[in-house]
Amino acid sequence: MTIQRTIYLLLGIMYFQSSFSQDEVTSDSIPLSYEMRVYTTTSVAGMEEINIDGMLDDAAWEAVEWTSDYVEFEPDNASDPTEQTKMKIVYDDKNLYVAFKCYQKDPATIERRMGRRDDFPGDWVEINIDSYGDDRTGFSFTASVSGVKGDEFISNNGNFDSSWNPIWYLDTNIDEEGWTAEMRIPLSQLRFGNDDEQVWGIQSTRRYFRNEERSLWQPLPPNPPGWVSEFGELRGIKGIKPQKQLEIQPYTVAQLDTYEQEPGNPFRDGSDTKLTGGLDAKIGITNDLTVDLTINPDFGQVDADPGAIALDGFEIFFQERRPFFVENKNVFDFRVGGGADNIFFSRRIGRTPQGSTTADSNLGEFDDIPVNTTILGAAKFSGKTKNGWAIGLLESVTDREYAEIKLNDDPTVLNSLEEIGEPREELVEPLTNYLVARAQKDFNDNNSYVGGIITATNRKLEENMDFLRESAYTGGLDARHNWKDRKYYVTGKFTFSTVNGSPEVIESTQTSLTHLFQRVDASHVNVDPTKTSLSGTGGSFEIGGRSDNGKWRYNTGGNFRSPELELNDIGFLRQADQISQYANVRRLWNNPSTWFRRANIGFNQFSQYDFEGNYNRIQYEINSYVNWKNNWWTEFGAAHKPRIYTNTILRGGPRWRWNQENFFFLFSGTDGRKKFSMHAGYVHSDAKQDNFSFRRYVLRFFYQPINSLNLRLVTEFERNPNKTQYVTESAFNGTPRYILGEIDNESLSTTLRVNYNINPNLTIQYYGQPFIFKAKFSNFNYVNDPVAKDLNDRVTWYNNDQISFSNDVYSVDEDGDAKVDYEFGNPDFAFVQFRSNLVLRWEYIPGSEIFLVWSQGITGLGDVNNDFGKIIDNQLLSERPQNTFLIKATYRFVL
């Protein structure tokens, strides 16, 4: 049956291909050369300084010619664009100057939308600069016609990182021929070598909003093998000296928190205030290598995490949002297989304290535990040398964190107690040092690289902190090789880890959900309570390629994580003890036809094993994407999972089998260029015998009533019933009882984002999200034969005579002797959360900002028996939220 389904899917791809190919317009008949272009610039040092006003009327611009014409890249590759673009580049001792002339026959059609920095709204043009000359990294500067800046650091030959925020200058102008843009980029913001004559890679892209076209200065074929490696050349830069960057940015923050007063609680008197300050700095050690420093950083202007609940017990992965750690994060990226698993996860630094207190409410005690660990300081040393070494070093120290314990401040309450506690402080997080070191070396004409990473986490354990690991060390090696003009590639990684601690801590590591050495049916692992360290390995391998015409892409590979691999002290690892294999092939239609602009369809196969050799999973999936002629789009996919086993669902119990599953998804959206656009999506999954199902409904609305205001509203509803959701473990006559229940869980979230741009440097941004999650259990059962094919053989259902409910506790009389054999608590719950953030941001001079912030939050448990409407009325709208008001001011000194 599996082979038959595979054949059907492959035949479907062939039919889909033939149907699309009938109308596809190819570029084979278009006489175009993709040969590398060269532009020669000249110095304007000594001439009158160029005034950045967007007018392009300075005499210095006459020193060079305009570039050759741009060529369309998307959708109609290798053709003449609807509107032409030209570029000029000059330089002096301190700056690079770039001018663009973007022709547009009807200037009234120029789209002048505004947005946040790096939003790329409306019509825009950009330049990418590979000043390293390494064919892998670059710097991108984007000018929207409205004057909004975009800047990104490019790594790994095409990964754009918008967290990079250099200081540069931009202005634009609209005239009768179209629009123009003028840039001044200080050389201190770029990285280049000491050669007397520089040769840089450059590329320029223009977005013609009206037709949703992309045109390039350096022509490229569809789906090129890379981005930076395909740049044209900029020549003529002579005699410039590397500029060592030195920037210092002190800040100060005044904060007021207000909340509902809690009688008797000395920590909840209704309000708190705080005044603090710190320092950020960027120091150029050489022109190639930079040190970023932060002392006592503050991240009060950062959006809150979205609402989420995990019923499987695993940690939820949230993206890093703090600017210091987001900027240049790609330098330290070292993924372990697929998903979010990574040797370095920067949110471990400054994490929520892991300890708890001994505060006893019966003694009249209240505790106040800090929300985050204080980062005393952090430093990043990063850059890339002219001879191909990419280097990254991060060092951070977080402080001891103490929880404060005080007595009830109501004398009447204290007098009523038989025994009273005492005020004190208790340690909840130890002094910790984090270190990450990363290096990569290019060779083989920049077609290959090898690299490595090492991390270290060291804690000073004292007082009650002996439940934490004392130290953790991880490392890895990676390599990639491209050949035949990057048509083919092979890449691989190897990872290792060692954690150290007391026997009790290492035993806890072995029995954690990530490892589960105590699994009752696992013969390849066992818990050793005497160990004081644990070492593991991981790795991955992939080989792939593309066709000469860019119409096919394919890869196959695999990855593994040994049972002992542990990364979670400074990294992120969901589950160890896995061996995975995958294969992917995708057909792409790069040129428009009579009914679409571009399209693709792919087939994916995935399987998974554990280190005992158990064959746990196989999945076949087909997915497709079409960008229609009217610029609407559709995504569709479907998958068949005939085999699904898991080692974790019973939390240390035996391996568990799910019924086979089939799912499909369908998403579609209207033309995003319109003032109003929307997306709608649906995900549908069913398992045999109704073991479980999943439904997801998504609606997204986008509205831009005026150029300076845009709104985004996203609503998602999910329902995930499951007849065998894990509840708890008990025992019956010495035999483990893994108790499951039929869960009906639903979640609802709505996210609103509003961006209002008074001008490109003064913006107001709002983010708000209510999130509600309900889980209600019934039809409890226990595991009988965990790997049986039939669900009714897999579990045994309690009848009404065996189970009873009273005082929020379920009592089980399994053998019917009128005596309670075991009990478990009511697992029903409802979680309610609201988060909002209103930020006014003013960049009053380049690199210096003032933030006014108002944050609100509500978090609590709701009534699972209420519908969403009542939960919103009774809790979200009736409870008093916690408010945070803060003012943050920064000033950047460029020395």
Image (cartoon, rainbow, N blue to C red):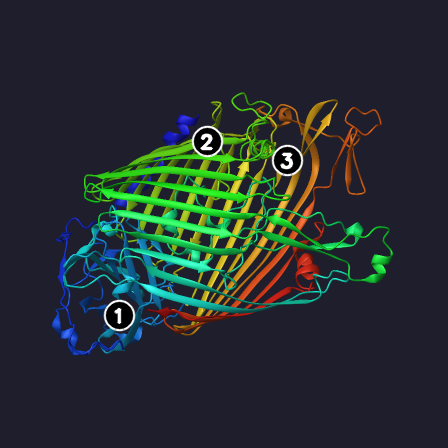
Task: Tell me what residue is drawn at x 69 percent, y 67 percent.
Answer: 270
Closer to the observer: label 3 or label 1? 1
Distance CA(mark 1)–CA(mark 2): 51 Å
Q: Please name the residue that numbered disc 1 is placed on.
A: 183
Res 597 seen here? no
Horizontal and vertical percent position of residue 320: 47, 53
Give the mark nearest the N terminus, 3 or 2: 2
Determine which of the numbered discs, if any, sits on residue 247 in the image.
none
Q: Please name the residue that numbered disc 2 is placed on.
A: 536
Horizontal and vertical percent position of residue 362: 80, 50
Q: Residues within 10 Å of mark 1 (few under 14, many from 20)?
A: many
Closer to the observer: label 3 or label 2? 2
Tag 2: residue type?
Answer: Gly
Work out whether residue 14 or residue 879 is closer to the camera in this orientation and state it: 879
Quadrant of the rendered structure where residue 9 is? top left
Secondary structure at badge 1 equals strand
Horizontal and vertical percent position of residue 675: 41, 68
Horizontal and vertical percent position of residue 553: 29, 40
Closer to the observer: label 1 or label 2? 2
Q: Left or right of 604: which side holds 865?
A: right
Q: Please name the residue that numbered disc 3 is placed on.
A: 726
Work out whether residue 676 or residue 542 is closer to the camera in this orientation and state it: 542
Tag 3: residue type?
Answer: Tyr
